[in-house]
Amino acid sequence: MAVEESGDMQKILARQRAAHARDGTPSAERRIEWLDKALDLLHTHGDELNAAMSVDFGHRSKDQSNLTDISQSIETLKHAKKHVRKWMRPDKRPAQFPLNLLGAKAKVEFQPKGVVGIISPWNFPILLAFTPLAGVLAAGNRAMIKPSEFTAQTSQLMGELIARYFGDEEVAVVTGGPSVGEAFTKLAFDHIFFTGATSIGRHVMRAAAENLIPVTLELGGKSPVVLGESADIQVAARRIMAGKLLNAGQVCLAPDYVFVPKGKTGQFVAALKSAVAAMYPEGLKDNDDYTSIINQRHFDRLHSVLDDAREQGAEVIEINPRNEDFSQQPHHKMVPYIVVDPTDDMKVMQDEIFGPILPVKTYADVRETVDYINAHAHPLGLYYFGNDSDERDLVLNNTISGGVTVNDVFFHIAQEDLPFGGVGLSGMGAYHGRDGFLEFSHKKAVFTQTGSELIAVIRPPYGEKFRKLIKFQMRR
């Protein structure tokens, strides 16, 4: 549904709140029913959603969309469906001594928070709406989703499809531009989940603070790659470039820059060129496997980053295996570029790139990479390539990042039993699998007191037995 007035969103929120209060905590069967609806939606309408995403991007690989958005969302929903009964079980805890000896009991129950607002971005418009939705529904909540206006066709179709499968008391989609998004963040949800830029995350958190709403912020940043001395450069280059060119680099976890041992830059750049030629043997311009930049504004921004690097003296290497002319094209496709030995004064090293540009820096001692990473904001992801366990541990144990993949990029996000989230400027909170269930649940402490009146010792009037008990508890 298209929503232009904040009052419409308020009405939906009110209906969802009323339904949640009326129906109480949903059973496992009800939650599985919701998850099945989402699964059926994606199984039945995946091709339509892929087509819409391609229209929104100008061109987006449908095979890539199936990989990243449709199949991965299905895997997440299936995982939640398989495990939700187990996740819902209360977590028994030991009662404190001596109450435990008298029959007191303690447990943690996982209670739905109520209504969760999901703000999803344009780069993976289905994945980043349905993956958090899996955790929201598994935890027994209702949801309102505000997708990006940049992917208008996909957002509209997603809204229409969700309206077919869910009542608006269960899940609703609201569409619109920045004014709708701003109003959405001001709604009194029970939790807000946001995926997007750090700059927008600040606004979301500020708005949520007015209602003291807990937030999960999945942001981004400059995720580094450390190529160790023992790394297989050919293998590393193939895996790094596969990650860098997925969605044309428009990925929050994309390898943002690479540290290469001194003296190996030339070999590494050659391996990157070979990797691109192998993945796109027919070129990039008319290749269905290669995705466009989302719009003219982002296309221009990326080229301005390259212009800035050139003006400041960096070596900028274009990777264009078939020497295609990209000056005239129906979309915004962009060839990959390597920026060799950039300085921190260059734009390419200041903000998240979010495109097919890869800076390559050199180091003499791996400790230099650790010092550099620690001198900057904590990244969402960190990647180490190599077979030297001491070197690997040095890098991993002395840096802080949202997550790590060793000898590849991205793959930690695809593991449903690993939490996914950032730290510091790359985000707060985590989801996926049970961690998503916990993120969207209220962990309610429940204590059942003993029936024994021996506990009367802790009530006035205080006597010698009370003092002995306190002395015992205060012992060293």
Image: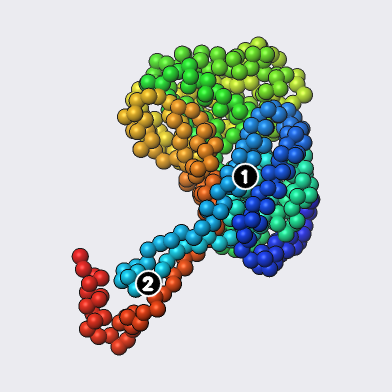
Provide the secondary structure element on which disc 1 rests. helix
Q: What residue do we see at 60% from left, 52% from top? A: 138
410 up-or-down from 120: above or below: above
SS label for mark 2:
loop
Q: Amino acid at mark 1?
A: Leu
Report, in whole angstroms, how far the alpha carbon at label 2 lies from the one at label 1: 40 Å
Q: Is residue 6 left or right of residue 451?
A: right
Q: Amino acid at mark 2?
A: Gly
Q: Is residue 351 visible?
A: no
In the displayed structure, would residue 64 be above or below residue 427? above
Q: Is residue 239 above or below residue 107?
A: above
Q: Which residue is mark 1?
A: 77
Residue 400 position within the rendered picture, expressed as x and y whole percent measured from the top left: 41, 41
Question: Which residue is the extreme one toward the left?
Answer: 476
Apparent side of residue 297 relative to residue 418 in the rendered image (left or right)? right
Q: Dividing the image into 4 quarters, which one contains the C terminus?
A: bottom left
Give whichever of 87, 410 is nearer the camera: 87
Asked whether 412 or 334 is in front, the reply is 412
Few, some or many C-alpha atoms within 10 Å of disc 2 (few <14, some 14-19, many ≥20)?
few
* Rendered residue at 25%/85% (across/down): 463
Is residue 61 depicted above or below 38 in this figure?
Answer: above
Name the image quarter holding residue 281. top right
| Residue 369 tag number | none
Residue at the spot 47% in from the left edge and 39% down from the top edge? 403
Horizontal relation, residue 252 to residue 143: left or right: left
The location of residue 7, given as percent across then percent down, is 76, 61
Residue closer to the observer: 459 or 363: 459
Q: Which residue is mark 2?
A: 103
Residue 456 in the image: x percent, y percent? 33, 83
Q: Is residue 232 visible?
A: yes
